[in-house]
């Protein structure tokens, strides 16, 4: 049994706590922290946990906590991740690894200095059954060498505070990680384009945005991020290769014939769309702790995503292509082991 | 933690043991029995279990076993299920509940005499996300009152020993339970039809078969069972209602465009098609033991399926419609509680 | 140029007249008749025809009419078809060929006596691109020998006068012809089943109905006819063979993602669903007149459909299987020539 | 009856001649010309035409020719189109309207000086049932104001001589016209991107290419052109609006379950994919001649496509965004009439 403490009782912390409490074998949820004590108490009560902290470092140093999930706000990630490394405890850090590329580099360097991987970054799509099947088919040569990749990321709505920059750092960041992982290529350049924004967006906010990445192997990547698309939470992916294409199938839902239409429901929220992915992510993380072999996105991947998003934001502001430099990779990440098979898939 | 013993180290026992060992929270696999000791040892070794029995009753009475999965051959189910009831231990019995309707009645009566439900029958489709969605939509009134239900059950191949009767008792039995559960109606009559058999079938074996059931609420049910269909394991369901229809979507797999075709893979085996259902079935079963509220198919459902299949076999042999009498239902099963929500779905 | 006269200015006559006037090369619509002269005048005005008759035989004998479409009520078909045969003029007769099997036999015998085929029966599905593709794939061996065929025939609504018998004679008649044509097998027996009718049906009317046919080659055919299905006009077909299955794809319509759903429109009327089939049917008919080689359903096919439907109505009334005898086939129809390729498809 | 002469007996001329001869009402194919007389004779023989010319202007001035289809090589279009205008004869000119924007301007100015529209440019997609449905839904407000449009254009293979520039002028030109027509917006800028080319492309040829257009209404258009995609001829379109998206459905073909897959055939050639569109295009053109109301793409549209493609080629060579100026529109094209309904759809 791995005893897990969760930092942050907000949306992601709650999602992870519930998943741990009901669907992950080999894990015991033992502690929760949040700076807002009512929120921590509420979640602790729901999932029957009795160790509740206001202060995250106390949770990290609790000897009854074997491993930590960081699901607090982005600016706190660097400090908490460094504390976990110092304490030698495995940590699943929600994206981003840190609020800036420089901060992410601090975490990366600390782990590299430690000489062993303790950090997994919460890019759950790597555990989604559909994406895994796509990667397996691509790696198996189903379509020959990849040439173009499409990643479409639409959400029905976001708060007004979700600005043009957050479309990159909170939304496109997932597409960046998914494509890097799927293709096994690094990104080398980025151009952000935006046309007329939806009337749903506050004045001055670019939504949707089209982001074009170039990769080290010559693949062009086209990402559409549209977070006020109204109609649903819609995640699509197609990889075009020399001999064919691979398309992510949306999760199957009942087909209804009614009122003159044949229709399927679309998910409305990421928790719904990626419910299986979150279970698989935590199951694989817990198994990897027991087993000693890291899985999922590494600190390097978390750092890379942060660097790439900063370049995209620069392109967004300058309206010009921006080059990306990811040459300084610590040797600890040189040969990432193949991921464990995800239980049940 | 619920300690589970598995009786039978064959196909289903192995499937359940692997699922318990990797994907079900709150359960610990502690014992395995099989009359073939090499088979028991092999599986025990694979899943790291050290209590291995040749004799199932010993496993049932082991104080370190809280709950039992019966996955041995059908003729043994009655004896082992009765022993579990006597020992007061929760049991998940693979279908059929017993080899004959009379034997199933013995189990049913024993549980009814006990006055509390300990038996769950392994009809895993009730836990399949697709079927659950269909039932929820139907219960929610999406298509109005149901009028016709289709259940198509195709498998690529079976051993030659799989005869006309087994097409009913081993294959159609699943469709029977799924439809009873989905519609909440009892079956009252059955007619089996068979045209020209596939040349893949041994002489004298009817495959495919069309089975038409009538239900207490007037719904006509059309089941096609075709177990040497060669092309894949293909499970379909459509319910036609007064205002529309509901169709089960096959699990989503990657769409491949290649060599002049757009194509998706079909599953080839039931373990693959229903992998999520098996995890959800065991997860719900373990949670129901902790919680004290039974879930899934009851002994009554198991008994009913056996009675219905015997009637279908009679129709198969007489080429005439056969009436089904399921009036003698013990009060213990009068009001089946709504099932627990399945974790993660 | 083939000069065509249309008998009947109702629903089907109007459909054919409009198609002839706008979409069929090599044809000129020159005359229209209807016993209701206002109706004839209205249609003649719409399609710019100046020869208008109240009496169909006058139209048939008009020397300016080379070929005739019979789209008047079923009881008149026998008389008008016989008149066309007598006049030696090619005729496209809407289904049914005649109101009873005995009457259809009169037409059949008259044509057989004449010794050459002048009659085409208006089973337009034989010209539908989707059905043609299905037949070509089946004939090409794509799924091996056929074992089961499904034909689903749903319409949103019909007038209250549409009774249980008309569900067979006006609806299932299309499925009968399509399956006979596609399989190239004769039907030998029929059983009609009906469960609870939809509350949309008048008292005493069976709707939906399930009709099971046996074919000379051992194929079982399952037809569902549901003419008050409310949700749309939905035509489906699947043929299950020894090595796989062939499914008719519904016509492609735009996929709309909106309001939480991915949805496609369904047709609401047969004219919409089979618009291309009607154009292809008339185009092939006109070409066959110029060319001298008959296409489409023959008088034999029209006769067979009538015989089969009478057997089905008997089964409907007796609740028993009814045998079908179609052994008395005139030699004129012994070897039907392969149909001409339909222009443009 | 409109008598039509076809200039050019190559691929497109043959396609049009066959369509005219079999599927277009109201038209008579009466003359064919080609500089290679064997080619002209072969086609004339196939479609039973006896007036054969080596010299196109002779065909144009033949009093027995009412209307002309120009399907000769691009460099000849300007001369022949001008000759048709001079002769006052309606002309359907295959794309491009002329080999250069300057030449297209000559034709445009000549028609504008004439003061009435005689030229239709052969952008057949405007007559494709799928695209028409998309436009109707968009115009009907199904998804609100458009924001992004995707147009994907893949072909299995092309001759080695098909170079980077032709990917724009022969392939993307169709996407340009389709998007302009569907959105009713003019294009104002273009950027061409290319990553690693497929190994199927000759050295130095960019294939695939990604082309991003900006439109006057702020819509961003993403075109992928990939003409050596090997797997099939695959045309896709999605328009993303403020309230949802519209996706072109591929033509329906039979769904085959076989050998472990569910699969549909893809078309391999444009003639197959757009067979219905070519019939509808010619049918509408002939009807428009009889009726006097022009339909389809005008000389202005043909000119605009040429200007836009020249800008795209400049971007391809300079690797920079290029602005497009289409401000100089003759008043003749100011208010293009709504197109006639296409017969049969």
Image (spheres, coloured by chain):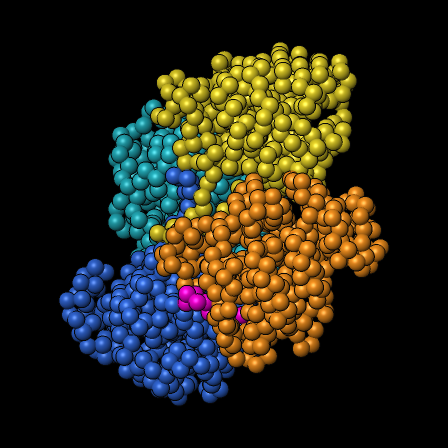
Chain colours: A yellow, B orange, C blue, D cyan
Determine the residue positioned at 46% across, 62% down: B185
Residue D141 lies, in percent from the top left, at 32, 38
Q: Is residue B247 left or right of residue C118?
A: right
Determine the residue positioned at 23% across, 60% down: C47
Q: In which quarter of the image is the N terminus of chain A?
A: top right
Relative vertical location of residue C172 with respect to residue B36 in this rendering, above or below: below
Q: In which quarter of the image is residue D226?
A: top right
Prevalent SS, magenta region? strand
The magenta segment is B210-220
Q: Which of B64 and C37 is in front in this view?
A: B64
Relative vertical location of residue A59 with respect to residue B274 in this rendering, above or below: above
Q: Report the number of numbered marks.
A: 0
Q: In this view, does D236 lie to the left or right of D82?
A: right
Relative vertical location of residue B336 with respect to residue A7 in this rendering, above or below: below
Determine the residue positioned at 53% across, 14% down: A314
Residue A93 lies, in percent from the top left, at 62, 22
Does the magenta portion include B219?
Answer: yes
């Amino acid at each position: 049994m791995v005893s897990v403490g969760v930092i942050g009782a907000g949306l992601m912390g709650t999602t992870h706590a519930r998943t741990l409490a009901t669907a992950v074998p080999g894990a015991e949820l033992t502690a929760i922290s949040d700076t807002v004590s009512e929120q921590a108490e509420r979640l602790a009560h729901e999932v029957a946990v009795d160790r509740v902290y206001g202060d995250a470092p106390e949770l990290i140093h609790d000897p009854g906590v074997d491993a930590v999930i960081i699901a607090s706000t982005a600016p706190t990630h660097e400090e908490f991740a460094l504390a976990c490394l110092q304490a030698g405890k495995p940590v699943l850090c929600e994206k981003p690894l840190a609020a800036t590329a420089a901060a992410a580099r601090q975490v990366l360097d600390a782990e590299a200095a430690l000489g062993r991987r303790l950090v997994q970054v919460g890019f759950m799509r790597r555990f989604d059954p559909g994406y895994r099947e796509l990667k397996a088919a691509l790696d198996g040569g189903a379509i020959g060498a990849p040439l173009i990749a499409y990643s479409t990321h639409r959400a029905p709505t976001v708060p007004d505070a979700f600005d043009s920059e957050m479309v990159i750092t909170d939304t496109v960041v997932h597409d960046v990680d998914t494509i890097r992982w799927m293709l096994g290529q690094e990104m080398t350049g980025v151009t952000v384009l935006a046309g007329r924004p939806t009337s749903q967006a506050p004045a001055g906010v670019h939504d949707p945005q089209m982001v074009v990445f170039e990769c080290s192997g010559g693949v062009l990547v086209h990402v559409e991020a549209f977070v006020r698309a109204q109609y649903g939470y819609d995640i699509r992916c197609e990889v075009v290769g020399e001999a064919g294409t691979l398309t992510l199938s949306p999760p199957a839902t009942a087909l209804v014939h009614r009122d003159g239409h044949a229709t399927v429901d679309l998910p409305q929220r990421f928790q719904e769309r990626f419910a299986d992915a979150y279970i698989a992510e935590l199951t694989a993380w817990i198994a990897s702790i027991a087993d000693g072999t890291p899985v999922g996105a590494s600190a390097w991947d978390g750092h890379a995503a942060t660097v790439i998003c900063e370049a995209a934001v620069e392109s967004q502001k300058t309206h010009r292509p921006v080059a990306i430099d990811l040459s300084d990779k610590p040797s600890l990440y040189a040969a990432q082991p193949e991921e464990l098979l995800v239980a049940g898939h």
